[in-house]
Image (tube, coloured by chain):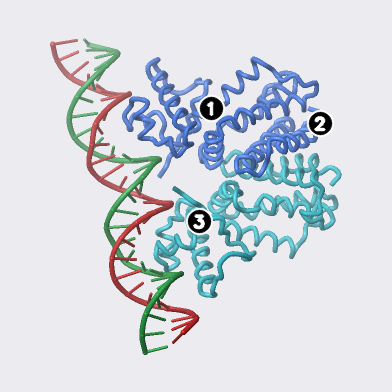
Chain colours: A blue, B cyan, C green, D red
Amino acid sequence: MRTSSATVATSSDGEGSVRTRSQTQRRKRIVQAAAALASRGGVEAMQMRTVAERAGVALGTLYRYFPSKMDLVVAVVGEEIDLLESSIERRPPGAATPEGRAVDVLMRATRGLMREPELADALIRSLIMAEVQTPFGDRMAGLLLRVSGEGLSFEQASEEQRDLAGSLAGVWVHELLEMLRGRRTYDQIQRRIETAASRLLADL
Amino acid sequence: MRTSSATVATSSDGEGSVRTRSQTQRRKRIVQAAAALASRGGVEAMQMRTVAERAGVALGTLYRYFPSKMDLVVAVVGEEIDLLESSIERRPPGAATPEGRAVDVLMRATRGLMREPELADALIRSLIMAEVQTPFGDRMAGLLLRVSGEGLSFEQASEEQRDLAGSLAGVWVHELLEMLRGRRTYDQIQRRIETAASRLLADL
DNA sequence: CCGCAAACTAGAACAGATTCTAATTGGTGT
DNA sequence: ACACCAATTAGAATCTGTTCTAGTTTGCGG
């Protein structure tokens, strides 16, 4: 029986048990090893034994840090989202309208994922299949709210605003999946995202 | 290496090699056994060995009919969608507006899925994973177009109409996933679907 | 009826995720 | 220095999807 803890290794490392520096670094090494392997042959190449070996850690230890492979995948995805967030902070979307900025963010993320199709495919699918509760959807929705409103945070937003941002994120994931399996071109995604955004975000 | 054939056991059994009656019945028995197991403990309980045993065939034979577990799950999903379609034909949605009818259909499907949460989980996840080789997304979008326009078929619809119906289907799937993860109640889904539909389908 | 190819069967074998075990190490309080 | 507990390790063991093997049965054209 897989238990799949809800622990997620994002940058927000707020609660739970104390964690020493060496433990944090060890965790980091593991995630890096995993990401490196996954960016080659996808999740298939990211075998637990191999990850443990590359990270210089016993298999049991790997499982102490990440109770299931999915938890590890989630951690890798978390890092990718961190990257996207900092990229957006560095160079915020410049479009004039809220919808335009949201589309900017989504298409930038799309291009990022397209650069490593193996990794992207594996990660997106794994996440969808995951029983783990991932902060993925909310993080994406929050990101959209932040760029489309004026720095609106996920918590401050009204219920309807959150619904709509969440729906747009859902549409995006759906389109990504279609792309990853060769049923969408980049341009088609852009068109559909624009269409959906213009309707879903019409009036913040 | 998983190959995951494109064979799908929907009612449309058009092309490919000839298939005798006994083969078809055997296939049916397998799918039934699989569905029965899945409706208990989900995909986990639907172990290939167990399915084979229940269906009264050898493991090798099961793999002859369904080259991978995913192919089997896809077949089960196909049956469920058939069910939904005929249910809608029997009792068409009665709402006054196109959006209302679309919401009707989606929420009816949602209730159907909620009745067998374990099965629903397996079903939805595989629906997403298997869209590679099955027109499930298009089938759902087509269904929505048919009830929201006046019997508009997927092929007749304009590109934008298909985009929008597809997006709504995407949002619905997304919400279902969240529900299966215990992050949505039925009412929340209804609200979000209504919100999304009213915007995405505003003016057919 | 004969022979052959495809379908079928029981069961072993293999692969990778996950769990378990027994021994070792490292840090901490006394 | 000592006792002790949590973290770690190497490796065996288990579980389930998938593949392989070797023999058996079935349907069909001649």
Query: Residue B79: percent from the left, percent from the top?
Result: 60, 61
SS at circle 2: loop
- CA gap between label 2 and label 1 equals 30 Å
Residue in the picture at 47% in, 37% down:
A43
Q: Chain of mark 3?
A: B
Q: Quadrant of residue A103?
A: top right
Query: Residue A172: percent from the left, percent from the top?
Result: 67, 36
Query: Residue B141: percent from the left, percent from the top?
Result: 72, 50
Callout 3 amino acid:
Ala
Callout 2 amino acid:
Ala
Q: In front of the other: label 1 or label 3?
A: 1
Q: Are marks 3 and 2 in contact (CB under 8 Å)?
A: no
Residue identified by numbered label 1: A78
Query: Residue A155: percent from the left, percent from the top?
Result: 66, 24
Callout 1 amino acid:
Gly
Residue identified by numbered label 2: A202
